[in-house]
Image (tube, grey):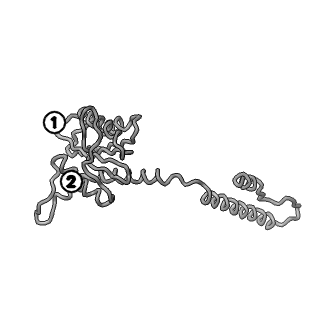
């Protein structure tokens, strides 16, 4: 195999003279050392070229999915800063106040439009436990569902966790969902342990990948 040949050639490189005497000038040793370095450089370059030319490129889809999730995470983590910025408009002009879940969905929808082409709001999921539910946004090409929620005074952390567990089970039956992103907007810091809830809800053995983002972090 080419790889084995390159490795053997690399191991056979000599950085010193094969024969010398006490009368051999120093520059001969330097020349031998430099020839060895040049040979090593050539073999390594050949190995890199072979990897680029022949190695299977099966990472594109995984890298793309990771990039999309990272983008969605950044949007969710910066959502609160954008919502606050909207409150300070020139000449006190009217703006969108994020008071409930519908406001969160409207503003998040606008953010998603900046980065995704095919966004399908309010897609119906298959029936689960005798009921049907609408997802907030289906990113069709990316096969990602984005679910948006907002905490309120009457909602306890346990209730929120139960809702997200039910949502997760529903979306596992959705034919176009490989990944579920649950964004929970918590501007008042009502959730005392957001990192713990995120970790617990993401740690499951279901058929879809789940990412839970609670923001801003108190």
Which quarter of the figure is the C terminus placed in?
top left
Question: How far apart, in angstroms, are the residues tagged by discs 1 and 2?
Answer: 22 Å
Q: Is residue 216 visible?
A: no
| Closer to viewer: mark 1 or mark 2 | 2
Residue 154, numbered label: 1
Give residue 171's quadrant in the image: top left
Camera-side residue of 1 and 123: 123
Question: Is label 1 in a helix, a strand or a loop?
Answer: loop
Residue highlighted by disc 2 = 106
Q: Is residue 90 visible?
A: yes
Give x and y (percent) for residue 52. Answer: 60, 59
| Residue 211 shown left or right of residue 43 in the figure | left
Give residue 22's quadrant in the image: bottom right
Residue at 63 percent of width and 61 percent of height: 49
Give x and y (percent) for residue 161. Answer: 28, 35
Residue at 68 percent of width and 62 percent of height: 41
Question: Label 1: few (<14), some or many (≥20) within 10 Å?
Answer: few
Give residue 34's quadrant in the image: bottom right
């Amino acid at each position: 195999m080419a790889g084995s040949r390159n490795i053997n050639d690399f191991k056979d490189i000599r950085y010193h003279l094969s024969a010398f005497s006490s009368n051999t000038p120093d520059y001969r040793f330097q020349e031998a050392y430099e020839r060895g370095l040049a040979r090593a450089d050539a073999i390594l370059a050949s190995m890199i070229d072979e990897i680029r030319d022949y190695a299977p490129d099966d990472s594109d889809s995984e890298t793309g999915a990771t990039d999309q999730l990272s983008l969605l995470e950044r949007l969710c983590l910066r959502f609160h800063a954008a919502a606050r910025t909207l409150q300070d408009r020139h000449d006190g002009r009217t703006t969108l106040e994020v008071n409930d879940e519908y406001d969160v969905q409207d503003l998040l929808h606008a953010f998603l439009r900046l980065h995704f082409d095919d966004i399908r709001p309010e897609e119906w999921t298959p029936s689960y436990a005798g009921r049907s539910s609408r997802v907030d946004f289906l990113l069709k090409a990316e096969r990602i569902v984005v679910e948006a929620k907002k905490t309120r005074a009457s909602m306890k952390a346990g209730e929120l966790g139960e809702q997200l567990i039910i949502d997760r089970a529903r979306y596992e039956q959705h034919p176009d969902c490989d990944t579920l992103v649950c964004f929970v907007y918590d501007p008042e810091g009502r959730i005392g342990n957001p990192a713990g809830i995120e970790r617990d809800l993401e740690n499951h053995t279901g058929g879809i990948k789940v990412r839970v983002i609670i923001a801003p972090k108190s």
